[in-house]
Amino acid sequence: MRPWLGPEEAEAAAAAVSSGWVAQGPRVAEFERAFAARVEAPYGVAVSSCTTALHLALVLVGVGPGDEVVVPSLSFIATANVVRYVGATPVFADVEPTTLNLTAATIEAVLTPRTRAVILVHQVGTPADLDAVHGVCDPSGIVVIEDAACAIGSLYRDRPIGADSDLTAYSFHPRKVITTGEGGMLVTTSEAWAKRSSRLREHGMSLSAEARHASSSVVLERYDEVGFNYRMTDVQAAIGLVQLERLDAIVSRRRELAEAYRARLDDLPLAGMIADPPYGRTNYQSYWIELSDDFPVTRDALLQSLLDRGVSARRGIMASHLEPAYAETAHASLPITERLTRRSLILPLFHEMTEGQHERVVAAVRAAAGSA
Ligand SMILES: *Cc1c(COP(=O)(O)O)cnc(C)c1O
């Protein structure tokens, strides 16, 4: 991944610096409104990362010690870590091999009377089947929190991911589709949750710094509960406002490049390749392929052979339950997760990728597969 940044972002950041408002201020408020409108959500709360957005979501729901939260093991480790931050227990569920996502069936298999929430990841931007997941969770009062770190610009049944959602968290890390350097956003349909998370990200302060500066009479802030410092800065928000305008162009270019990969790699011995699910549209945040048992070399040998040809690819999505940090966490067997993390890899894909670069990647994969 290479972020698509131009002089417009540099100018917007410089304007924020010149204004004197460098911490959370008017540009953060504007970015929140613009982002929420873009994903058709009533409220957006900008924070320092997707990880901190997910942490706040669990605090809002009231998840704590003794509670269980269902998460995919096949995800960036932050998805599981946030459950540990609130003292609850992550329960790993398996994923389906076509979307890499949890399903109603894999969730249902691990539910217990202690399940309070599910963190549903839209992995690498591929939407999970929200209606089906709500179908198993809603009757038991289990809250579905969406980890849309990678899914800005993806659609579920023609609506943006995050529309009409209880709680959805996004990331603006440079590895994702649009970036603010570091940053995140929590969107929600609940006015109460939006207000409380705005306070929680600012040490639990009853009144923002911007509101105090704007007031013509003296106002003293109050601290009703213990909060965090999870603020985004106005310099980041200024960049984010420009990036948001590039989103449509980024997603359509990613979809073109992804279609070209599919056409040029389809005949190789692969077990799977990222594609749109029948109910939605992916932004192709990452282009993953899964090698079949007939592929002539192992996944790691393929990565090395690509690197030898100057192509920097990456292993597929990690499996959190295989990391030492989760060695003590009990889990059911996760055969699809384990196969995917061993057999898949991610090919280069970025907005400014040239035709020549695309051809070089394809040629390097085909050479390693022995079918140049
Ligand atoms: C990147 C990522 C995160 C973490 O995002 P940050 O903004 O870096 O905190 C969480 N979940 C998933 C699925 C991710 O891909």
Image (spheres, grey):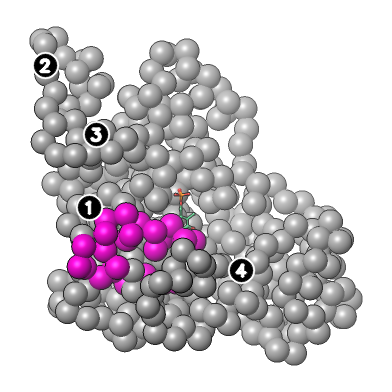
Choose the circle earlier in sequence order: 3 or 2. Answer: 3
Choose the circle earlier in sequence order: 1 or 2. Answer: 1
Q: Quadrant of residue 33?
A: top left
Residue 228 visible (yes or no): yes
Q: Which residue does the numbered mark 3 point to in the structure image?
A: 203
Q: Are marks 1 and 3 in contact (CB under 8 Å)?
A: no
Choose the circle earlier in sequence order: 1 or 3. Answer: 1
Kind of residue indicated by mark 2 = Val
Choose the circle earlier in sequence order: 1 or 4. Answer: 1
Question: Residue 325's spot in the image, x, y percent?
Answer: 46, 63
Choose the circle earlier in sequence order: 2 or 4. Answer: 2
Q: Which residue does the numbered mark 4 point to in the structure image?
A: 316
Rendered residue at 51%/83% (across/down): 336
Q: Are marks 3 and 4 in contact (CB under 8 Å)?
A: no
Q: Secondary structure at mark 4?
A: loop
Disc 1/disc 4 C-alpha distance (Å): 30 Å
Tag in front: 1 or 2: 1
Q: Which residue does the numbered mark 2 point to in the structure image?
A: 219
Q: Which residue does the numbered mark 1 point to in the structure image?
A: 59
Rendered residue at 58%/78% (across/down): 340
Where is 339 relative to 117, above or below? below
Q: Secondary structure at mark 3?
A: loop
Q: Secondary structure at mark 1?
A: helix
Tag in front: 1 or 4: 1
Packing grade of label 1 (10 A; few <14, some 14-19, many >=20) is some
Q: Answer left or right for 49 relative to 291.
A: left
Decide whether residue 74 is among the magenta residues. Answer: yes
Q: Answer left or right for 15 relative to 28.
A: right
Kind of residue indicated by mark 4 = Gly
Rendered residue at 46%/32% (across/down): 236
Q: Which region shows up in magenta? A: 65-89
